[in-house]
Image: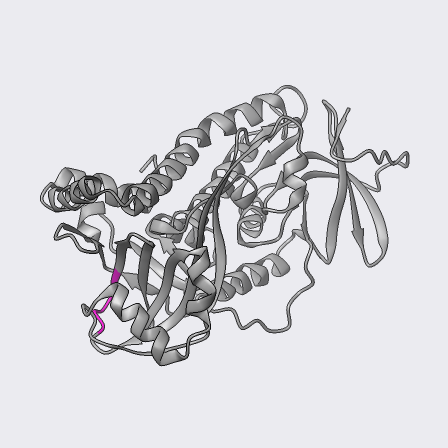
Amino acid sequence: MSSNSPEKPDINPERHIDVLIAGGGPVGMALALALQEYDYSVLLLETRALPEAVDDPRPLALSYGSRLILQRLGVWEKLTQPTPILAVHITNRGHSGQTHLTPDDAGVPALGYVVNYHELYTALRSLIQQGQTDYQTGAQVTSFQTNAQRASVLYQQNGTSRLVSTGLLVLADGGKLAEQVPEVNYQIHDYNQSAIIANLKAGSPERGAAFEHFTLDGPLALLPSGGGYALVWTLPAEKTETILQLEDQAFLSQLQDSFGNRLGNFVATGKRTSFPLILKHASNVTSRRTVLIGNAAQTLHPVAGQGFNLGLRDAWELADEISQSLPGGANEVGSPRMLARYNKRRRIDREGGRLFTDSLVKLFTLNLSLLQTATGLGLAALDHLPPARRFVARRMVFGARG
């Protein structure tokens, strides 16, 4: 028997659950919702208590592929006026090459949509609470053990320890628990960068246009959001705090200098926050009776907005694999055969997402004149090659299998 803790409770589990999901963020909730149409018992554990109100300015770029998943889950219609992305302009500061992607390149009505993170979280939570999922908040997994037949999970809630068994333990957030799964090792790369996020107003906005502007400091993304823009500005870690502390006008001036005048003058900024950027990915996302999805499986650089969309596809395809499992035998929920199928099914998309985002960051931030010239020429060539534009656009919209 393997364990993430020396603790070995000798009491019998209170009950058996087909699928236990540890991590009640959007990816964990999406998996729970996807499983509601099937006849499985599901327990969803969320460490945090339910927030009364959240002032969370984080923008979330959903691909059109993610919209299709959220529609199937009944979430999409609960979101108020997602802002469509009708064009993506990709530029490299100081070089003339650029690429312009449109929905026609991917064969979709919109490349993606921008929503507020907390609005999506609230919509998912509302549907979870209305459904059949056993949803427990303020519940923290403290240890787990696995054998060939089941996983035993110990969690604490309101000062009480509870032990349950499950056919499949799903770890769906990026906490320390996932690092203790047997047979799973993480590779970590610190970009030594942080991302500043804020909501902005520009003097001459372009309806539906998103911008990915590469600089030697890192990519600067502007996503259409309502009548303004959601900013995701990557900077070296040592510059971030100084930029955050600037008065609004000085901050907008620094941003203007980095981005240019394509949208006229930036005229207003909202609350600014930041978070450090790392690449963290699991060498293997399955172990005995255990699977990792979302941030537990991979944390990516925000360039090209791939991280959450990749996690949502994890949840959707895991639900599909679970739905094909049969009670008992070699193909039951959490069996080695089922987990091997899921691992194989997700490998290309996971590795493709990691390589795509990591390569973009490294190519455009290396201060080598020949390389920077080559990237500019590459963007210009891409703009004139419809098959290549289609490949890039569908990769961004549907992942590596698009």
- The reply to whether residue 77 is visible in this rendering is yes
Q: Residue at x 51, y 28 (%)?
A: 343
Q: Position of residue 77 (x, y in %)?
A: 43, 63
Q: Nearer the viewer, residue 178 or 104?
A: 178
Quarter location, residue 222: bottom left
Q: Residue at x 43, y 44 (%)?
A: 310
Q: Position of residue 234 (x, y in %)?
A: 38, 57
Tell me the chief SS of the magenta region.
Answer: loop
Q: Position of residue 344 (x, y in %)?
A: 47, 25
User: Which quarter of the rendered picture does the C terminus lie within?
Assistant: top left
- The reply to whether residue 40 is visible in this rendering is no
Magenta-tinted stretch: 205-210
Query: Considering only vertical position in the picture, is 129 above or below 374?
Result: below
Q: Is residue 72 left or right of residue 203?
A: right
Q: Residue furthest left?
A: 384
Q: How is the image coloured?
A: one colour
Inspect the magenta stretch and tell me whether residue 387 lies in it. Answer: no
Query: Considering only vertical position in the picture, is 249 above or below 310?
Result: below
Q: Residue at x 27, y 53 (%)?
A: 214
